[in-house]
Image: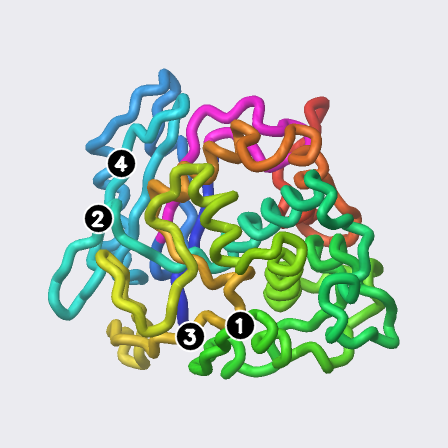
Amino acid sequence: MIKTPYYCFMKENISITKYKVMKTIKAFLVCIFTSTLFLNAQDVASAKGAIPVDQADALLEECINFKELVGMSAGILKDNEIVWSKGAGFIDLENKVPATNQMVHRTASISKPMTAFAILQLFEQKKLDLEDPIQKYLPDFPVKKEGTIKIKHLMNHSSGIKAYKTGSEAYSLVNYPTLSSAIDVFKNRSLNHKPGTDYKYTTYGYVVLGAIIEKASGMSYRDYMKKNIWDVAGMDNTDVEVFGKKYPNKSKLYVKNEEGQFELDKFTDLSIKVPGGGIQSTVEDLLKFGQAVLENKFVSANTLEMMVSDTGVKKRGNPYGLGWYIYGKKEDE
């Protein structure tokens, strides 16, 4: 059962890797949709670099014809230019409102690297250190018997803070007016392990990072992200999703029932996890985000190299850096 949209970034040449850091990217494909889907950028970009628009359009329609999602949007960024973007299916199935490249989606966990960049900006400004214990900024967060949680532990998911305890937390209908009130949900729970010794993916760790951004910057999380991340990248249609607010071109949420038919899902409140999964955006804004990463608009090249280096805490599968999964091979492999 899909409760919220999932997002998939694909590149013709993988850019988020220690060994090929942002050097060989030829095309940047972003797909946004209401179910999990994986596409190959080679299907929409020829070897000579031309974009066969008819084939790209047909691929989107084919995805919709699988009847596993209601609507999607996708785009290609090549040589610093958005060369193709389009939507397929519907924003609103009941009223047959077609999806377009202006469709606004929840970005889910793509919120996390945005938050990670904000932390590293403050690191470069010497307003925080990744070795700092979180209590330096959040004195009300209990010191844990399992050990001291540092900022870097939150970034690489080694803090030991556990994931959602219940489905009602993962798909919350409760409004939390501040990040502090969201942290109150989990701050008194025991840790999964000693901080820094193991990997445990958790959105809650990024909620704590959001609160640290507020303390270190003196700004609200939303204001900081707008000024220093979204505006820097020209992401005019990206924002924190405010529960109950009406947005133009906003996609509805759907789920499949037992008969395999789409029906409207509950509109969950993302305020419990804003810095880790509460941001909304469009396909073209996410392409701009990717381009800003490649051009080192957020942090220096050295800091980005640190960000996409294996932190060593994830022992199985793709390693994890600071806000990114790391893909690709060494140059000599």
Mark 4 / mark 1, whichever is N-terminal? 4
Disc nearer the start of the sequence (2/3): 2
- Label 1 residue SS: loop
Q: Where is residue 28 in the image (x, y as percent from the top left)?
A: 43, 33
Question: Which sits in the foreground, 5 or 226?
Answer: 226
Q: Which residue lies furthest to the top in this view?
A: 48
In the image, what residue type sits under mark 3?
A: Asp
Image point (58%, 77%), residue name: 181
Q: Does 3 sit left or right of 179 as displayed? A: left
Three-letter amino acid code at the position of disc 4: Ala
Residue at x 68% of width, y 41% of height: 307
Q: Mark on residue 178?
A: 1
Instruction: Name the disc covering residue 143, or none.
Output: none
Q: Mark 2 points at which residue?
A: 100
Mark 3 or 4: in front is 3
Q: Quadrant of the N terminus?
A: bottom left
Q: Give the extent of the magenta segment.
A: 12-32
Label 3 element class: loop
Q: Name the residue under label 3.
A: 269
Could you classify mark 1 by the number of other residues whose Cα lies within 10 Å: few (under 14), some (14-19), or many (20 or more)?
Answer: some
Mark 1 or mark 2, which is nearer the start of the sequence? 2
